[in-house]
Image: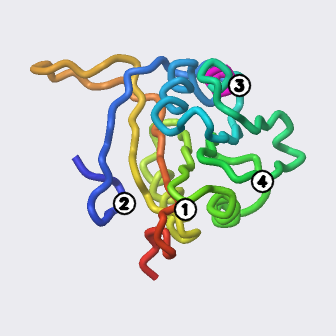
């Protein structure tokens, strides 16, 4: 399977069987744990821009360092981080391009931005990826979060609840932005 925005090479799509988030929250506890363990190492700094305590719990349990954002409306300080996690749409009054410019500046080379989108709007992921690419971030991976794991040989439709787009600050100067 390929990506929704053509990549060079195509971006892999992965299915994570995790519970759906509670109303008003960005993710479930299981999603927070998977993001922290899959995208960081013990000494890495994580910036949490999510709604709900799930990512903070995962950061503490994994003994990672964090910059937790409890007052997103007042703005947030930018620290050099390995991972920035946010729901979408962002509460930041800036344009998406400005948001991703700030993310790129705050990421260490090879660092990632994880954007969690409610599943269903087919245009929204394309808009987010386009804004991130214009800011110099490379589109690395698309994670589909579903309530149950797909089973071989069965043609059941997944109950997808969240799309997670992973962008990275490339070690190359152009960040995957070809011009």
Residue at image position (76%, 61%) is 94
Q: Residue furthest right?
A: 74
Q: Which residue is mark 3?
A: 52
The numbered disc on residue 132 is: 1
Mark nearer the viewer, 1 or 2: 1
Which mark is first along the chain, 2 or 3? 2
Question: Which residue, given by chain and number where applicable, does mark 2 sit on?
Answer: 5
Q: Image quarter for residue 109?
A: bottom right
- 2 or 4: mark nearer the eye: 4
49 or 42, nearer to the observer: 42
Badge 4 density bin: few <14, some 14–19, many ≥20, Cα 10 Å: few
Q: Picture coordinates of residue 97 (x, y %)?
A: 64, 66
Q: Which residue is mark 4?
A: 78
In the rendered image, residue 58, in percent from the top left (x then y), is placed at: 61, 22
- Write the residue at 71% across / 22% down: 53
Closer to the eye: label 1 or 4: 4
Which dot, 3 or 2, sits closer to the camera?
3
């Amino acid at each position: 399977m390929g990506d929704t925005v053509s990549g060079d090479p195509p971006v892999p799509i992965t299915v994570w069987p995790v519970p759906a988030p509670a109303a008003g929250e960005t993710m479930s506890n299981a999603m927070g744990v998977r993001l922290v363990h899959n995208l960081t190492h013990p000494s890495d700094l994580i910036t949490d821009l999510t709604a709900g305590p799930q990512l903070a719990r995962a950061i503490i349990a994994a003994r990672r360092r964090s910059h937790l954002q409890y007052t997103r409306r007042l703005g947030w300080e930018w620290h050099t981080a390995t991972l920035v996690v946010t729901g979408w749409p962002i509460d930041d009054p800036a344009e998406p391009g400005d948001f991703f410019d700030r993310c790129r500046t705050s990421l260490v080379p090879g660092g990632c931005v994880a954007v969690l989108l409610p599943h269903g709007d087919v245009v929204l992921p394309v808009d987010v990826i386009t804004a991130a690419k214009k800011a110099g971030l490379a589109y690395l991976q698309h994670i589909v979060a579903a309530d149950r794991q797909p089973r071989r040989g069965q043609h059941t439709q997944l109950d997808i609840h969240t799309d997670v787009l992973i962008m990275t600050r490339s070690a190359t100067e152009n960040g995957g932005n070809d011009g």
